[in-house]
Image: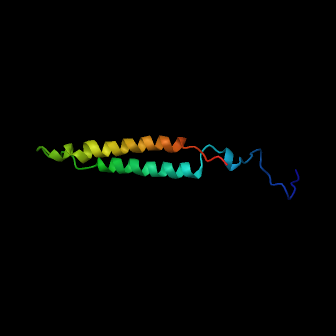
């Protein structure tokens, strides 16, 4: 099979124009930010557990049972928004 110099071989694959792609660069940037927010929420839930036989009141801190899960949940919601963010119409 002889190839011409003007036409590269595509082996049956056609490249779509950027306007037809479902996700744009902005979508990926927003998803990365949402992923970082989710990780921050999970990091806020970290802490030492109850290692010894005595009670550790830190396991019931507001940061670990309210703030961390709320930030992680908002990150998941923002991830959905980032995926569905509309493209600009030209």
In the displayed structure, does residue 50 sit left or right of residue 74?
left
Query: How was this image coloured?
Result: rainbow
In the displayed structure, does residue 65 sit left or right of residue 34?
left
Q: Residue at x 53, y 43 (%)?
A: 83
Q: Position of residue 64 (x, y in %)?
A: 26, 45
Task: Decide which of 38, 48 is in the foreground and name it.
Answer: 38
Q: Residue at x 64, y 46 (%)?
A: 89
Q: Residue at x 27, y 42 (%)?
A: 66
Q: Position of residue 50 (x, y in %)?
A: 18, 45
How many callouts does the rendering have? 0
In the displayed structure, does residue 81 sit left or right of residue 74?
right
Q: Position of residue 4 (x, y in %)?
A: 87, 56
Q: Position of residue 45 (x, y in %)?
A: 29, 47
In the displayed structure, does residue 88 sit left or right of residue 52?
right
Residue lying farthest left?
A: 54
Residue lying farthest front?
A: 90
Task: Decide which of 35, 7 is in the foreground and name it.
Answer: 35
């Amino acid at each position: 099979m002889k190839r011409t110099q003007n036409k590269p071989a595509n082996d049956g694959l056609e490249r779509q124009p950027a306007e037809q792609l479902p996700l744009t660069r902005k979508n990926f940037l927003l998803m990365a930010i949402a992923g970082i927010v989710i990780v921050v929420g999970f990091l806020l839930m970290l802490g030492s557990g109850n290692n010894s036989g005595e009670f550790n009141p830190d396991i019931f801190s507001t940061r670990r049972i309210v703030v961390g899960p709320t930030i992680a949940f908002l990150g998941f919601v923002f991830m959905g928004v980032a995926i569905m963010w509309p493209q600009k119409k030209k």
